[in-house]
Image: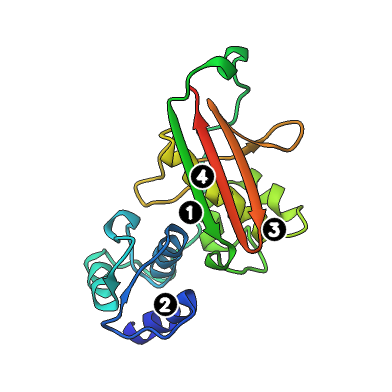
């Protein structure tokens, strides 16, 4: 397990990792680590992993404390989305903001995939509608990176929370008639530049 984990982390971080190396993980990298552990038979919980300064040994210790699964983790069952976008009340534009969130994500932190719908990482963190939208774009992975940043911004603005396992499928970034991103009770904006995606969320209600 240790050898495979070290190899995975080395690929994830783009540099050699040793058992006692202290590593810092972004939110997307941490989510990929949790997905990898789940896919390799450990019921890893996102909330138990700190975002930075963890050693490989500490990761293995947390993973060994989790209840082992029987074989590879299957894709989670589809559930009804509980944050379906809705139109803002006309008065929302005049309301004082109640929260502000901003997030920056590197495209390189999201795993490459030939089938986003069956990929465990994307299946756990994106809704069917989000995947369908991004697959139709010229660069699906870049679009997914932008949506991930928007989900993070929504959470930071206090408009939603990830699941207890740290997964984001319960937060859906919608689109208005012009294709702009939406989330209930919020104003959301996404931008892309040179392998990066940034998003801002202003919570109004």
Q: Is residue 10 left or right of residue 198?
A: left
Gap between marks 3 and 4 measured at Cα: 16 Å
Q: Is residue 190 visible?
A: yes
Circles 3 and 1 in contact, beta carbons < 8 Å:
no
Q: Which residue is mark 1?
A: 76
Image quadrant assignment for residue 35:
bottom left
Q: Which residue is mark 3?
A: 140
Secondary structure state at the residue bearing disc 4 = helix
Q: Which residue is mark 2?
A: 9
Q: Position of residue 53 (x, y in %)?
A: 28, 68
- In the rendered structure, which disc, 4 or 2, sits on the residue that comes first in sequence? 2
- In the rendered structure, which disc, 1 or 4, sits on the residue that comes first in sequence? 1
Q: Name which residue lies at 40% across and 40% down.
A: 161
Q: Which mark is residue 170?
A: none
- In the rendered structure, which disc, 1 or 2, sits on the residue that comes first in sequence? 2
Q: Which residue is mark 4?
A: 151
Q: Name which residue lies at 36% across and 87% down.
A: 3
């Amino acid at each position: 397990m240790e050898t495979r984990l070290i190899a995975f982390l080395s690929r994830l971080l783009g540099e050699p990792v040793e058992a006692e190396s202290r590593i810092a993980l972004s939110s997307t990298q941490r989510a990929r680590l949790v997905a990898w552990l789940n896919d390799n038979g450990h019921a890893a919980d996102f909330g138990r992993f700190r975002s930075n300064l963890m050693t490989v040994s500490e990761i293995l210790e947390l993973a060994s404390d989790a209840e082992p699964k029987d074989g590879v983790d299957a894709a989670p069952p589809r559930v009804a989305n509980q944050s379906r976008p809705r139109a803002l009340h006309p008065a929302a534009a005049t309301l004082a903001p109640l929260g502000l969130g901003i997030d920056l994500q590197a495209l390189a932190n999201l795993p490459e995939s030939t089938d986003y719908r069956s990929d465990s990482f994307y299946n756990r963190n994106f809704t069917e509608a989000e995947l369908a939208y991004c697959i139709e774009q010229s660069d699906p992975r870049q679009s997914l990176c932008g949506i991930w940043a928007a989900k993070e911004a929504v959470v930071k603005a206090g408009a939603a929370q990830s699941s207890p396992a740290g997964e984001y499928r319960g937060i859906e970034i919608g689109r208005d008639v012009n294709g702009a991103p939406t989330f209930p009770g919020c104003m959301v904006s996404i931008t892309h530049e040179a392998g990066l995606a940034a998003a801002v969320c202003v919570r109004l209600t």
